[in-house]
Image (cartoon, helix red, strand yellow):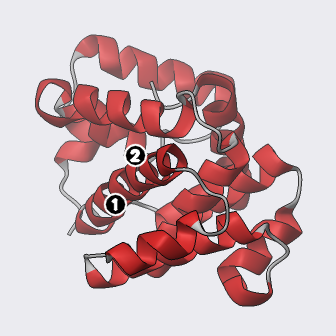
Amino acid sequence: MRPDILDTGYRPTTKLLFTLIRLFSRQPVPDAAKLVFYRPDFYGDAAKTFTHEAMRGPSAWSVADRELMAAYVSKLNDSAFCIAAHTATAGQASADDGRVRAVLSDLDSAPVEEGLRATLRMLGTLTREGTVTAADMRKVLSTGVTPQQIEDALAVCAAFNTTNRLADAFAFELLTPAAFEAGAKFLLKRGYR
C-alpha cells in the first residue's frame, strides 16, 4: 500500500529540489528518491551513503557489472520498479542492452565472463535462500574472483535486497521507459548521493 506521505511529507527545501528535478528532467521524481528524502535522519542518509559506496566506490567490478548485479537481484525479488531502473542503468553503463537482457533471461547462456556468472549465481542463492555456504564461495573464488570482489558484490546484494523490499512495501510507481532512461543517466552521472 502506497502511503500518501511519499507525495506530501517533505520540508520546503526538498519540495523545491523535487520541483527543480521535474523542471530540468521533464520527468517525475522517482519514488526511490522520495523515500530517501522523507526520513533522511532515519533511513535516507545512511541508505544513500551505503548504496553509493556499494555501487560507485572503488571496486574491481565495473559500474556496469554492479548495476547488472542490482538488476539481477531485483529480478530474483520480482521488484518491478528496481528491475526497470537497474536494467536501464546497467544497459547504459555497459552500452549493451542485449547482454543485460540475456543475463536477466537466462544467466547460464548469457554472454558474461565466468567470474561474473559465478558471482551472480552466488548472489542468487543468497537472495533466494538467505544464506550461502563455504562451498558456494569456493566456486566463485575458483573462477578467479577475489575475496574483495565477493565482498563488493555482497554489498550490492545487501543494498538491493533492502531497496527491493522497500520499493514493493511502499508500492513504488512504475515510470515510463523514457523516465527510467533519464533516471539511469542521472545515476550514472551522480551516483546514489
- The residue labelled by disc 1 is 167
- On screen, residue 137 versus residue 142, left or right, reads left
Residue sitting at x 34%, y 38%: 34
Q: Nearer the viewer, residue 59 or 47?
A: 59
* Among numbered discs 1 and 2, the one appearing first in the sequence: 2
Q: Which three-letter amino acid code belongs to the residue tagged 1?
A: Ala
Q: Would you identify the image quadrant in which residue 160 lies?
A: bottom left
Q: Would you identify the image quadrant in which residue 101 lies?
A: bottom right
Q: Is residue 168 above or below residue 166?
A: below
In the image, residue 170 lies at what x, y percent? 25, 61
Residue sitting at x 54%, y 42%: 28
Residue situated furthest left in the rendering:
42
Quick check: marks 1 and 2 in contact, CB under 8 Å? yes
Q: Which three-letter amino acid code belongs to the residue tagged 2?
A: Ala
Q: Residue 78, can we see it?
A: no
- The residue labelled by disc 2 is 32
Residue sitting at x 19%, y 51%: 4
In terms of secondary structure, where does tag 1 sit?
Answer: helix
